[in-house]
Amino acid sequence: MPSSDSRFRPALAAAATLALAACSPTFNWREVPIADDGLVVLLPCKADRADRALPLGAESVQVDMAGCETGGATFAVAHASAESPAQAEAWLRAWRAATRSQLGEAQMTEAPAVLKRAIAAPAPVRLDAQPPQKGAAPVQVLWFAQSKKNGGVALYQATVLGRPSAPEAATTFFEGLRLP
């Protein structure tokens, strides 16, 4: 007759296996604040930061970025600060157009999106793109904005470039965007 310890070993082994699978070293999720406007994102790896001038229409706009690459994909958030809602609307329209032009012949689907606490104008927009070349990296983008206390508008572009090795990674990233 088996001892009571041996009856529990398979259950303990199964529980340990599930726990180890949940702690993937590839996707080590962490909260990362973006700029000083309050957005917090979940990134699956240690964030690298950079800033650059981005041509948006007739203007060159300073954009700061945080992102990382792991599990076959790049996860990134870019941020810019507009002085007014009208400027934010123009910049976001130009940002979307620039992104679409960079994707060239990709099959693109753009649709309204929802993000808790994002402002309605400019409205959140989601873009999913699949390049026509076999094996080329798909792109998922979410643009959104938030009002700032000084009357300005913080603009954001959240992007997943590639096919993450964990199917739920892109969903975790986009659902992990939190505005104050």
Image (cartoon, helix red, strand yellow):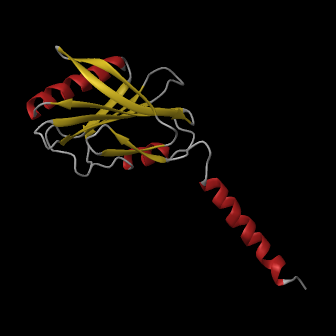
Total marks shown come to 0
Residue 129 lies left or right of residue 25; in this view the side is: left
Q: Where residue 161 sits in the image (x, y, percent)?
A: 45, 30
- Residue 85 lies, with reference to residue 113, above or below; the image says above
Q: Is residue 82 above or below residue 28?
A: above
Q: Establish if 142 lies above or below 62.
A: below
Could you tell me which quadrant the N terminus lies in?
A: bottom right
User: Which residue is rendered at x = 50% and y = 47% of the image?
Assistant: 29
Q: Residue furthest top?
A: 58
Residue 13 in sight from this viewpoint: yes
Front residue of 33 and 164: 33
Measured as percent of width and height from the top left, residue 166 is found at 55, 44
User: In the image, 165: left or right of 4?
Assistant: left
Can the viewer see residue 162? no
Q: Residue furthest right?
A: 1
Q: Quadrant of residue 61?
A: top left
Q: Position of residue 62 (x, y in %)?
A: 26, 22
In the rendered image, the residue lying farthest to the bottom is 1
Instruction: Tell me: residue 132, above or below residue 180.
Output: above
Spot occupied by residue 96 in the image (x, y as percentages of width and height):
25, 26
Instruction: Depth check: give the residue in front, 81 or 94.
Output: 81
* Nearest the eye: 91 or 63: 63
- Seen at 13% across and 36% down, the residue is 152
Image quadrant in which you'd find residue 83: top left
